[in-house]
Amino acid sequence: MNHMLYSVKSFHFLTNILINYDHGIIPACIKKIESDLGINDLQLGLLSSSVYAGIIIGSIKGAGFYEKYKTKQILTLCLLFYILSLSLFLLTKNIMLLYFSRFLTGLFQVCFINLIGIFSNLFSCVD
């Protein structure tokens, strides 16, 4: 396996680990999050749903980015902003910033969970 293909596969694998961890850890500790943040059930539901709102909006808008920009740039920026959105979630207790953080988490996951499989298979030879 050449170095470039190994790098792409490793990047995709590590990104999927990060996304699956995010999607798994939140439901597993949902009651702890509720008590630590001091939020009610409605706020907790909105917090949990915010990530899916980001995925939906990102899916609607995301496909056009691959036509305008290079895939490597899109994936690199999405990964960096994804990490920043997860960090924001860890660093704040402000409910509006938490909603925003979870929304951004979903928005930046779109490139990895919805689009990367399609484009990496179809255009694997194109730079």
Image (cartoon, rainbow, N blue to C red):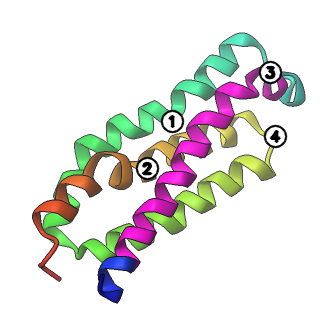
Q: Amino acid at mark 4?
A: Lys
Q: Secondary structure at mark 4?
A: loop
Question: Can you tell which mark lies on residue 109?
Answer: 2
Q: CA distance from mark 2 to mark 4?
A: 22 Å
Determine whether, in the image, residue 22 is placed left or right of residue 36.
Answer: left
Residue topped by disc 4: 93
Q: Secondary structure at mark 3?
A: loop
Q: Is residue 93 above or below residue 9?
A: above
Q: Is residue 31 above or below residue 101?
A: above
Q: Is residue 105 above or below residue 32?
A: below
Depth check, front residue: 105 or 117 = 117
Determine whether, in the image, residue 93 is placed left or right of residue 48.
Answer: right
In the picture, residue 25 is in which quadrant?
A: top right
Q: Secondary structure at mark 2?
A: helix
Q: Position of residue 55 (x, y in %)?
A: 39, 39
Q: CA distance from mark 3 to mark 1?
A: 17 Å
Of all residues, the one furthest to the front in this rendering is 1
Q: Position of residue 42 (x, y in %)?
A: 66, 12
| Span highlighted in magenta in the image | 7-33
Q: Earlier in the sequence, mark 3 or mark 1?
A: 3
Q: Amino acid at mark 1?
A: Val
Residue topped by disc 1: 51
Residue 16: say if magenta.
Answer: yes
Determine whether, in the image, residue 25 is placed left or right of residue 66.
Answer: right
Question: Can you tell which mark lies on residue 39?
Answer: 3
> Residue at the spot x=43%, y=50% of the render?
109
> Residue at the spot x=76%, y=28% of the render?
29
Q: CA distance from mark 4 to mark 3?
A: 10 Å
